[in-house]
Image (spheres, grey):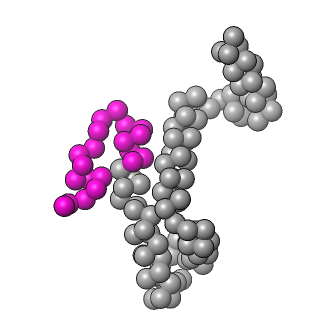
Amino acid sequence: MAADSVTRNIGRVTRRVPGLRRVPVVMLISAAELALVARDHLLLLTPAERRRLITLVRIGRGRRDRLTDAERYELELLMGKLQARRFMGDAITRLSPVRLPRRIVYGRR
């Protein structure tokens, strides 16, 4: 019974969102997994730090030379708090059937 309602609801959603029927379900699940991993890591920052991170990224627009030295240092501190290496490891662990060695995910001890 529950499976029928899930199938019916998925059918309604796919009719409303254009192009969604063409996207394989595996890709949708993978994108959702990555979003959950990213959310977990973003929650390591306080709301003020998250706002500041977004501001710095917008100022920099992907270019390091657009930030001042102080802003670069602040961005490095925020990225360190986000645990970028562990984020990469968590994302790969969620999507890959092969486990990564701990030293790659956590770094050298």
Relative height, residue 48 to residue 1 (above, below): below
Relative height, residue 13 to residue 87 (above, below): above
Q: Farthest residue toward the top?
A: 1
Q: Can residue 61 be seen by looking at this rendering?
A: no
Residue name at image x 58 percent, y 28 percent: 25
Q: Farthest residue toward the left?
A: 109
Residue 78 pos. (x, y %): 47, 72
Residue 95 pos. (x, y %): 42, 38
Q: Which residues are magenta?
A: 90-109
Residue name at image x 62 percent, y 32 percent: 23
Q: Is 84 situated left or right of 52 in this image?
A: left
Q: Is 99 situated left or right of 52 in this image?
A: left
Number of numbered callouts drawn: 0
Residue name at image x 50 percent, y 84 percent: 71
Residue 6 among magenta residues? no
Residue 107 pos. (x, y %): 25, 59
Assign the C terminus to one quadrant of the image: bottom left
Q: Is 25 situated left or right of 83 in this image?
A: right
Residue 4 pos. (x, y %): 70, 13
Q: Can residue 24 be seen by looking at this rendering?
A: yes
Assign the N terminus to one quadrant of the image: top right
Relative height, residue 13 to residue 95 (above, below): above
Among the 4 quarters of the image, the one containing residue 82: bottom left
Residue 104 among magenta residues? yes
Q: Farthest residue toward the bottom?
A: 69
